[in-house]
Structures are given as structure tokens and as C-alpha cells.
């Protein structure tokens, strides 16, 4: 029993220290990412000055310690840091990476998610509207990183461990996500899906209605290129 207690104590010390370090790294990177978003918003706004309708908004919003938003016209990128630290399931490709095979501790990561929403979904409080996870950044104890996401090629899982995340990396990740979202257009919902509605739906205000809007309703949002 004494040996088991020692194992419990050593595990607590080892894992809590490891996970706290990863959290601190991820939080530090998230702070840099927020600064990058703010700078991007300012640069895009300046570049488009006088070229857009005044109603078209280019705006950065800091939503607290773990969330930030970048609105570009009708698109809203929401970047959110998860407060937990994660391990990968046994089938993930990361286990084929030599850097991870050398030390299992390298596989523990914090996560920063990038979502794409319609800005009107929040403006009109359409709570049933759908958004899409278009990217996520994994950061470990040594600030090594890799990215999963639509068109994200900067650092794939098999390249994990080759270099730590940098300001240039963050710019590339965010620009790729923004470019994808701007070209991920809103499609007309199918006629069949909307041919019948209830009185309740029409009596409810549009900002709380059950009419769901999303860029690709009835579209299979695959992870084909993630």
C-alpha cells in the first residue's frame, strides 16, 4: 500500500507539473494570437479604407482570457483556447511521429480552436445557427506545435517537433483560416428541408427562430483535407 501511495503522489507531481507547463505555453501563445488578430484587423481595415460600404465591418473583439473574434464582412472567426490539456487516442497519426516516440510527454498538448460563423448569427441572436471548426492548433510543453484544419499545411502532425510556434506561424495559420472562411460561401437551403413550417416558428421572433442558417446545411463537412 505504501508503494502504491508513492506512485500516486509521484504521478500527481509529474502530471500536474507537465500539464501546468503546457497550459502556460498555450496561454502565452493565445495571447500572441490575439495580438496578431488585432494587428490583422487594423491592417485589413487600413488596406480597404474607402473601398467598402461603410456598413461592412472589419473588427477585432477581445472576449476575455480565452476567446477572441475577428469579423470580416459577413464572416466571424472565433478563436478559443481550451483550458484543459489533452492526450491523443491510440489511432491518431501523431504516434507515428519520431519526436513523440522519443518521449511520450511530448504528445500532451493544449488546444486553440478556430471556428467560422456567420456574423449575423450573433447579431440577430440566431441561437440555432451552425458554425464550423476550420482549424485547431496543438501546443506542447516545449512550444512545439502542429495544426489540423481546412487548407492548413504549415505544420502537419508528422512535422511535429521540428520547430516551435512563432509569430510568423500564427500569421500564416490565421490568414489561411480567414481565406478559407471567406471562400466558404453560404448556400441556399434545400427546398425540401424548408417546405413546411409551423405557426410557432412564424410567431417566434426571427432572432430566436428555429429556422437554422449555416454555410453548408445538408452538406457533409468532411475532414478530407485535415
Image (spheres, rainbow, N blue to C red):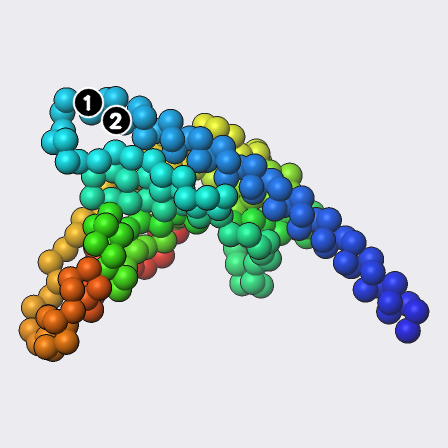
Q: Quick check: can you spot residue 45? A: yes
Q: Compared to 10, does 97 lie above or below? A: above
Q: Is residue 23 left or right of residue 45?
A: right
Q: Nearer the viewer, residue 147 or 30?
A: 30
Q: Spatial distance from mark 2 to mark 1, Cα to Cα? A: 6 Å
User: Percent x, y for residue 213?
Assistant: 19, 60
User: Percent x, y for residue 141?
Assistant: 65, 43
Residue at the spot 38% in from the left edge and 27% down from the top edge: 39
Identify the secondary structure beneath mark 1: loop
Residue at the spot 84% in from the left edge and 63% down from the top edge: 7
Q: Residues within 10 Å of mark 1 (few under 14, many from 20)?
A: few
Q: Which mark is residue 154?
A: none
Q: Is residue 208 left or right of residue 36?
A: left
Q: Compared to 153, does 213 lie above or below? A: below
Q: Quadrant of residue 182?
A: top left
Q: Residue furthest right?
A: 2
Say if mark 2 contacts mark 1, CB within 8 Å.
Answer: yes
Q: Quadrant of the N terminus?
A: bottom right
Residue at the spot 20% in from the left edge and 44% down from the top edge: 74
Q: Nearer the viewer, residue 62 or 183?
A: 62
Identify the secondary structure beneath mark 2: helix
User: Percent x, y for residue 65?
Assistant: 50, 43
The residue labelled by disc 1 is 49
User: Percent x, y for residue 177?
Assistant: 34, 41
Q: Quadrant of residue 221?
A: bottom left
Q: Quick check: can you spot residue 118? A: no
Q: Residues within 10 Å of mark 2 (few under 14, many from 20)?
A: some
The residue labelled by disc 2 is 45
Residue at the spot 70% in from the left edge and 49% down from the top edge: 18
Amino acid at each position: 500500500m505504501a508503494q502504491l501511495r508513492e506512485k500516486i503522489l509521484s504521478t500527481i507531481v509529474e502530471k500536474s507539473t507537465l500539464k501546468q507547463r503546457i497550459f502556460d505555453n498555450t496561454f502565452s501563445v493565445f495571447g500572441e494570437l490575439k495580438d496578431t488578430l488585432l494587428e490583422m484587423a487594423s491592417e485589413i481595415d487600413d488596406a480597404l479604407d474607402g473601398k467598402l460600404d461603410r456598413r461592412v465591418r472589419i473588427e477585432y473583439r477581445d472576449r476575455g482570457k480565452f476567446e477572441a473574434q475577428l469579423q470580416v464582412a459577413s464572416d466571424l472567426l472565433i478563436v478559443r483556447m481550451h483550458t484543459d490539456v489533452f492526450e491523443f487516442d491510440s489511432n491518431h497519426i501523431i504516434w507515428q511521429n519520431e519526436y513523440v516516440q522519443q518521449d511520450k510527454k511530448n504528445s500532451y498538448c493544449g488546444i486553440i480552436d478556430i471556428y467560422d460563423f456567420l456574423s449575423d448569427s450573433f447579431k440577430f441572436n440566431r441561437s440555432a445557427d451552425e458554425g464550423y471548426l476550420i482549424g485547431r492548433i496543438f501546443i506542447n510543453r516545449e512550444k512545439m506545435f502542429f495544426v489540423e484544419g481546412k487548407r492548413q499545411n504549415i505544420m502537419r502532425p508528422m512535422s511535429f517537433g521540428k520547430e516551435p510556434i512563432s509569430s510568423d506561424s500564427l500569421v500564416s495559420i490565421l490568414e489561411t483560416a480567414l481565406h478559407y472562411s471567406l471562400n466558404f460561401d453560404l448556400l441556399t437551403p434545400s427546398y425540401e428541408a424548408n417546405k413546411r413550417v409551423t405557426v410557432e416558428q412564424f410567431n417566434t421572433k426571427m432572432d430566436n427562430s428555429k429556422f437554422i442558417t449555416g454555410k453548408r446545411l445538408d452538406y457533409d463537412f468532411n475532414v478530407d483535407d485535415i
